[in-house]
Amino acid sequence: MAEASAAVTKEALRDALREKFGFAAFRAPQEDVVLNVFHRRDSIVIMPTGGGKTLCYALPAVLLPGVTICVSPLLALIANQISGLTAKGICAKVLSSAVTKSERSAVLADLASDAPRCKVLYVTPEGLGGGALQGVLHTLHSKRLLEAIAIDEAHCIR
């Protein structure tokens, strides 16, 4: 994973929370989870639907230079997440069977660059075994641009 930014402060997180996501304060336990991401501590976060899990990986993704991978099982949920992040000016993409060949090529080209625009890449559990995705993960890791991997639903863990 990429080097953690030890310089992140709670004030910087709260500023980004307000400016990018429009929230005045974190809900419990979001701030602790976000800080864990910055300090490269693994976390298991159990929150109800609508509890704010996305923020736990999307906020660090905005502030860190690389890409966060999110494994999510439902294409409709992924589309909703991408729409919400895009509306906030955050570049989020998906690699799945639902994207066209040209969309897939564009996403792969961006991820292969030295400064990917994509901040959050969504994949399905089935897509994790694909050769293209394995290549992306290897490339991002070798360039120190793989920031975090989030598993959005517990049943994605095999």
Image (cartoon, helix red, strand yellow):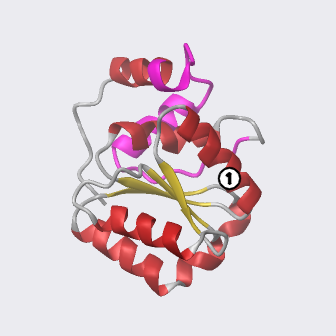
71 left or right of 64 in image: right
The residue at the point 37 percent across, 80 percent down is 135
**Residue 158 visible somewhere in the drawing:** no
Q: Quadrant of the C terminus?
A: bottom right
Q: Amino acid at mark 1?
A: Ala
Above or below, 87 against 140 in this view is above
Residue 59 painted magenta: no
Region rendered in magenta: 19-47
Estimate how packed mark 1 is, as few (under 14), some (14 to 19) or many (20 or more) residues with alpha carbons within 10 Å: some
Instruction: Quarter of the image for the N terminus: give it.
Output: bottom left
Does the magenta run of residues contain 44? yes
- Of residues 3 and 59, the one drawn nearer to the viewer in this rendering: 59
- Viewed as shown, does residue 58 lie left or right of 82? left
Name which residue lies at 56% across and 22% down.
Answer: 26
Residue 127 position in % (x across, y down):
59, 77
Q: Position of residue 87 (x, y in %)?
A: 57, 34
Q: Is residue 72 above or below residue 30?
A: below
Q: Give the total number of marks visible in the rendering.
A: 1
Residue annotated with mark 1? 79
Query: Residue 104's spot in the image, x, y percent?
Result: 50, 71
Above or below, 30 against 14 in this view is below
Q: Secondary structure at mark 1?
A: helix
Residue 41 can be seen in this image: yes
Residue at x 50%, y 41% (from the top left corner): 58
Q: Is residue 18 left or right of residue 111?
A: right
